[in-house]
Each structure stands twice: as C-alpha cells, then as structure tokens.
Image (cartoon, grey):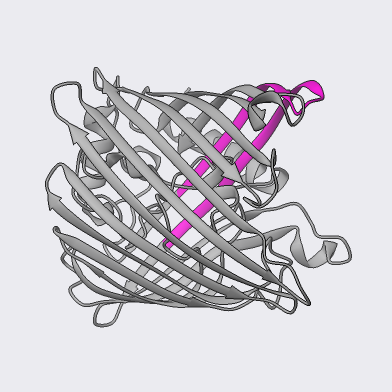
Amino acid sequence: MRPALQLGVLVAAVVVAVVLWPGLAGAYPQFQISRSQTCTDCHLSPAGGGPLRENGLIVAESLSQFGTPPEFFYGAIPAPSWLVLGGELRGASGYIQSPEKLLASFPMQIEATARAAFGPGLSLQVTAGPRISEVGKESKTFAWSREHFLMWQQDPDASTGLYVRAGRFMPVFGLRLVEHPTYIRRWGGTPLYGETYGLAVEYIDPRFEGHVTGFIKDPILDTPDHSNGVAGLGEYRINEHLSVGAEGMFTRSTDEKKYRVGALAKLYLDAPELLLSFEGQFMNQLIEPRGAPKQIIAYLLASRFVNPAFLIDLGLGFFDENVQITQLHREAVDLNVHWFATSHVEAIFTGRFETLAFGAGGPNAGYALAQLHYRL
C-alpha cells in the first residue's frame, strides 16, 4: 500500500473512532524526579499532560522499545511552528469483580488536542472528543471539550516561570496520577470528569512550584462535584532526588462544605531506579443541616523503570469514608505494568485487589485489565 493511501486509511480510522466512541485522559507523574525535575520539562502545560514540547518527544522516543518518530502522526502531517497537534486513543478489556463477576471490553479515551500560540506569551489549548450523553441533554452532550483554556506564559521559550490559565481544566492537586480509580483520584478532589471552569496562577522552577486555582460549578455539564472552591498545591525539591509538598482545597455547594489538607512526597533511589511517591489527605465534610464525616485518603506508590521501556507500579491505597464509624475503611493493592513499545504505542496491564475493612466489611473486589494506548 502506498504511503499516501496508508495515511488516508489511518486518518479515516481515527475519524470513525472519534465519532463512535466515548473518552477520557491523563499524564504520568512518575517521570517527575525520576527523569525530569518538572512536568514542564516535557509538557507545554504547567499541569503536565496534553501536548509534548521538544524534550518530551525526545523522551518518548528514547524510552520506547522500538523508537519511531515521536511527532504527531510520525511527522507525516506537517504543522506550522505556532500550532501543536496531538491526541489519545485508549481502550481496555479484561475481568472485573465488584463483587459481580464479568468480562468487559470498553473504550476509555478518544480525544484530539490542538494548541495554538499567538501574541506575547499567549496560547489557546483545546481537547475535544465524544462522550456519553447526559439524560435530557442528548443532543448537546454527545461531544464535548473536556479541556479548553487560554494561557499566558511569562517566558514562552522556557519551561519555567509564571503561568496564568483561564478556562476549563482540572485544578492541580495531589500526585496527578493517570489511574483515576486510585483512591486519591476518586475521593481526593480530582475525580474522573472533574474538570470545571477556573482561573489558575502557577509558578514553575526547578527547585519549587506552586499552583493556586479558583473554580466554579460547571454551568453547562453535570459534573461529579457541584461545588465552587479554591485549591492550592506547593512543592519543594530538596535535591534532585527528593521533593516534598503540601496541599489544601476548600469547596462549597448548596448543602455541604469540604475542607481538605494533605501532604505529598517523592523519593528517587538511583541504584534500583525506584521512585517512591506518597500522598495523604484529611477531609472534613460539613453537611447541612448537620453531620461532619471525617475522611482519610492515602496512597503509596513504588515505580520502577526497567530496560528502559518498562514501567512497573505497585500501589497501596487506603480510604476511610468516616473515621467515626468502624469498618467503613477500604484497602487496595494495585499493580500496573507499562510497556512503551514505540514512541506512540503503549501496552498496559492493570490489576487491583480490594478489601472492605480487611475483609470484615463485605466481599472483596478487584479487576485485571489489558489496555492499549495510542498517542497520535
């Protein structure tokens, strides 16, 4: 098949997929400290994720098993210097026990991203794709833009300095793991589809970074959290192998207030090429007219890079939805094995074993899934 025809078939397949499937997204914070000091060393956004800068493309190629050109569509579709294009396709199949036992196959993410730079340090980034329609809004919500924001950067030629963003995005909070079932994502303030409209002021430096985001309830879509609030995260890198941080979030809706405080840390051990990441949160929820459940959410993750195209994660999660009531806590052991086959293709095994109060609170649950991820 001729190259032009091959490219046409590939583009058509992507278009069909984008029309037919629902979607989702994320980035790998395991590369911070272990490979680079900041997320912006590889990504254009101060939050990480999304389009890669030149260094990120180099890393994607050098870490993969078989290389291949890392640019958008392998460089076959040229773009002007002010425009960066990208996208993600991701699907999964496997076994789920919750406690029902079933085999399932499902698309997870189908999105296209464009970032256009214009003016003195200004850029516009839009991520869009199909989604599951909301009841009563089918004609308006079968497609959406999960993220779209206008950004000003103090030095557009650098990966550090002051950033200001306004639009729809996820507040920078916590370890920012791509695995949304982890307790610190699901119950820690950044759930799946938790992006909403906000204004963020962020500063990135090789030794430290800070993010403050004010946000409001999404006026258009029905999101997991119907709150207005503010979130802040600060991180200090003591040396090139160790960082510590603190975080806080306040949200308010019509019938409750939530106060979150937390700490996070990362330690990279050279000899075994092992990264240890930790986040712990305490959340006080004030429910009107009465009630104040207090929650603890924690996660410890060990990540090891092997050969170097493999990344293995072993995580331990803990969530107590109300420390004042016994046997409400749950625990999880997570295992993720990533194989970066090429600069665009990643195969992932992800598994979990979960208990309720170490088995005293109900039946165990878990899953074992195989994922395929393609970066456009």
Q: Nearer the viewer, residue 345 or 290?
A: 290
In the rendered image, the vertical position of residue 351 relative to residue 39, given as above or below: above
Asked whether the viewer can see residue 131, the reply is: yes
Q: Is residue 77 above or below residue 90?
A: below
Would residue 376 appear left or right of 132 to someone viewing this image?
A: left
Q: Magenta segment, principal secondary structure?
A: strand
Camera-side residue of 57 and 286: 286
- Quick one: which residue is furthest to the bottom in this view? 120
| Front in this rendered view, residue 320 or 202 | 320
Compared with 316, 320 (above or below) is: below
Q: Is residue 101 magenta?
A: yes
Q: Is residue 2 visible?
A: no
Q: Where are the magenta residues, as a range?
A: 87-114
| Residue at figure coordinates x 32%, y 71% from the top left | 117
As drawn, which residue projects farthest toward the right?
A: 136
Give the x, y percent position of residue 69: 28, 34
Left or right: where does residue 199 sit relative to residue 288? Answer: left
Residue at 25% across / 49% down in the picture?
42
Residue 266: % across, % down? 27, 43
**Residue 241 is drawn in which quadrant?**
top left
- Which image quarter holds the C terminus? top left
Image coordinates for residue 231, horizontal then vertical, percent: 45, 71
- How many marks are shown on the rendered structure? 0
Position of residue 308 measured from the top left corner of the image (x, y, whole percent)? 24, 22
Residue at horizontal 50%, vertical 63%? 170
Tell me the residue at 39%/34% (across/down): 301
